[in-house]
Image: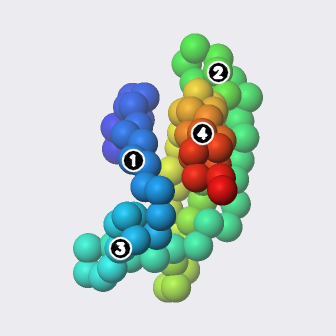
Amino acid sequence: MNLGTNDLKILLADSVAEAPNYEKPEYEGANLTTTHVVGNGTVAGNPTVDFIFEDESGQKYVAMLTGGLVENLADAVRGMRERTRQ
């Protein structure tokens, strides 16, 4: 697993109709069960956020994002809220 990636493509859709339809077999669902905010999670000493997912069979998956990427996502959500507010 390449843990050095510090990039994230953020795609925006104004409505459910414009958003992708995530279906099997390409996509499998999993529930987000836990998040861990880790201080000094990066080599540079910055925080990370670990997202723990679990599927129907009990298999667990982790997505580790830098705090900066999570902040960028939060900014995108705030911007979309303003953009689509009626």
Q: Is residue 40 above or below residue 24?
A: above
The three-letter amino acid code for the residue at tag 1 is Leu
Q: Is residue 54 left or right of residue 85?
A: left
Mark 3 = which residue? 21
Q: Can the viewer see residue 24 in this picture? A: yes
Viewer-side label of 2, 3:
3
Distance between the Cα atoms at labels 2 and 3? Answer: 34 Å
Mark 1 = which residue? 11
Instruction: Say which label, 3 or 1, has the lower sequence index.
Output: 1
Mark 4 = which residue? 79
Instruction: Say which label, 2 or 4, has the lower sequence index.
Output: 2
Residue 30's disc number: none
Q: Quadrant of residue 28?
A: bottom left
Q: Which element carries disc 3, helix, strand or loop? A: loop
Instruction: Say which label, 4 or 1, has the lower sequence index.
Output: 1
Q: Residue at x 51, y 74 (%)?
A: 30
